[in-house]
C-alpha cells in the first residue's frame, strides 16, 4: 500500500471539516468519460471527430446561434448520459465520511453532471463552479431566469448527431442553452452559481479555524480550476491539507499536501473503508 494512503487517513481522521474538490475524473469510475485531449473527447463523441470539432470548439456559446441543432445534440446527449448513469460507490463513501464529521462539509466541483446531488449530498452544500447541465438559460441574456431542464424536452437523432427537439426560452421563445460556463462566454448567467458561491463563502467563514481536509479527485491540468483552487486553499488556511487523488496527474508540492496515484474509486476505498 502507498504510504500516502496512511497519511491521507491521518489527515482525514484529524479533520473536523471536509472540502471535496472534484473534476471530470471523479465520474470516470461511474462510467462517464473525461475529455482528456482531443482523442479522449473523440472517443466519447465519434461524430465530432468526423467534423474535426474538439471539446474546446464545442464548449462555445456561438453554436447556439449558428447551429443549435448540433449544439443540443452534444449537450442533449450528455444530459441523457449523465441521467442514465449511477454515481459509483466512492460518492457514497464520501457521503458517509461527511456524516461522521457532523455534515461539516462543502463540495467544490467543475463537474456539470449533478452527480454529487444524485448521490445524496445536500444541494445547498454544493458549489458547481462551471454551472450545471441540468439547468438552461436564454442564449441572449446573462441575467434573468434559469430553468431546470427535463430530458424529455430534448430529442437527438444520434445518426445525424442533430437535435430534433430543443428546450425553448420561457421569456423570449428563443432556443435555450445549458447554464454551463463555456469558453469565450459573455452570456453565462451567473445567478445560480453566485448563490451557491455565497453559501460556500458563508460556510468557509465559519470554518476559518477548522482543521480542513481537502479531498481532490480527478482534476485535470487542461482547465486547472479545481487543482489551483485546492492549492490556494491549502496555502491560505494554516490548518488545511490537500489530498490529491489522480491515476496520472499526481504532481503536488509537499507544501500543499500529498498525492495518491490511483483512480478515484480505488483510492477512496483504500482510504475510507
Ligand atoms: N462529468 C462532467 O461533468 C464532465 C466531464 C468532462 C468534462 N467536464 C468539464 O470539462 C472541463 C474538464 O476539466 P477536468 O479537469 O475536470 O477534466 P479533464 O478531462 O481535463 O481531466 C480529468 C482528470 O481526471 C483524471 N482521471 C482519469 N481517470 C480517473 C479516475 N478513474 N479517477 C480519478 N481521476 C481520473 C485524469 O488523469 C485527469 O487528470 C471542466 O470544465 C468540466 O466542467 C465535465
Ligand atoms: Zn430568451
Image (spheres, grey):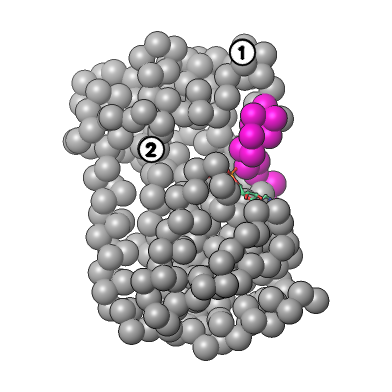
Residue 181: within the magenta?
no
Q: Residue at x 62, y 16 (%)?
A: 52
- Tell me the tag on residue 51: 1
Residue 190 rendering spot, x and y as whole percentages: 27, 43
Where is 86 relative to 264, above or below? above
> In the rendered image, which quarter is residue 137 located in?
top left
Is there any visible trace of residue 155 in the rendered image? no
Q: Nearer the N terminus, badge 2 or badge 1?
A: 1
Is there any visible trace of residue 20 in the rendered image? yes
Q: Residue at x 55, y 63 (%)?
A: 216
Q: Quadrant location of the N terminus?
A: bottom right
Classify residue 32 as left or right of residue 156: right
Q: Which residues are magenta?
A: 29-42
Q: Of helix, strand and loop, which one carries label 1?
A: loop
Residue 138 rendering spot, x and y as whole percentages: 28, 27
Relative to the observer, which residue lies in front, 272 or 40? 40
Label 2, label 1: how far apart the Cα atoms are: 23 Å
Is the shortest distance between ligand 1 and the CB of mark 2 under 8 Å?
yes
- Tell me the tag on residue 199: none
Residue 100 rendering spot, x and y as whole percentages: 51, 83
Q: Quadrant location of the C terminus?
A: bottom right
Q: Of helix, strand and loop, which one carries label 2?
A: loop
Q: Residue at x 23, y 33 (%)?
A: 142
Answer few, some or many: residues within 10 Å of disc 2's Cα (few below 14, many 20 plus, some between 14 and 19): many
Residue 27 rendering spot, x and y as whole percentages: 61, 51
For the image shown, how many numbered marks are present on the structure?
2
Classify residue 150 as left or right of residue 6: left
Q: Residue at x 38, y 37 (%)?
A: 181
Answer few, some or many: residues within 10 Å of disc 1's Cα (few below 14, many 20 plus, some between 14 and 19): few
Furthest-bottom residue in view?
14
Where is 192 relative to 135, above or below? below
Amino acid at each position: 500500500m502507498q504510504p500516502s494512503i496512511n497519511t491521507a487517513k491521518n489527515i482525514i481522521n484529524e479533520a473536523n471539516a471536509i472540502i471535496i474538490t472534484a473534476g471530470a475524473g471523479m465520474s470516470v469510475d461511474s462510467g462517464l468519460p473525461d475529455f482528456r485531449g482531443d482523442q479522449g473527447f473523440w472517443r466519447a463523441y465519434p461524430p465530432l471527430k468526423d467534423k474535426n470539432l474538439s471539446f474546446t470548439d464545442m464548449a462555445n456559446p456561438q453554436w447556439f446561434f449558428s447551429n443549435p441543432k448540433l449544439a443540443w445534440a452534444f449537450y442533449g446527449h450528455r444530459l441523457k448520459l449523465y441521467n442514465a448513469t449511477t454515481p459509483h460507490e466512492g460518492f457514497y463513501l464520501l457521503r458517509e465520511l461527511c456524516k461522521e464529521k457532523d455534515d461539516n462539509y462543502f463540495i467544490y466541483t467543475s463537474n456539470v453532471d449533478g452527480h454529487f446531488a444524485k448521490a445524496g449530498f445536500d444541494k445547498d452544500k454544493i458549489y458547481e463552479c462551471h454551472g450545471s447541465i441540468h439547468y438552461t438559460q436564454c442564449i441572449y441574456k446573462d441575467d434573468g431566469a434559469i430553468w431546470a431542464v427535463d430530458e424529455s424536452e430534448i430529442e437527438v437523432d444520434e445518426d445525424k448527431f442533430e437535435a430534433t427537439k430543443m428546450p425553448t426560452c420561457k421569456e423570449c421563445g428563443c432556443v435555450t442553452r445549458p447554464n454551463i460556463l463555456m469558453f469565450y462566454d459573455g452570456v453565462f448567467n451567473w445567478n445560480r452559481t453566485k448563490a451557491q458561491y455565497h453559501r460556500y463563502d458563508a460556510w468557509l467563514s465559519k470554518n476559518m479555524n477548522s482543521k480542513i481536509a481537502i479531498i481532490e479527485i480527478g482534476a485535470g491540468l487542461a482547465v486547472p480550476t479545481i487543482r489551483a483552487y485546492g492549492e490556494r486553499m491549502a496555502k491560505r488556511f494554516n490548518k488545511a491539507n490537500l489530498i490529491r487523488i489522480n491515476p496520472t496527474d499526481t504532481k503536488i508540492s509537499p507544501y500543499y499536501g500529498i498525492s495518491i496515484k490511483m483512480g478515484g474509486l480505488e483510492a477512496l476505498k483504500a482510504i475510507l473503508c
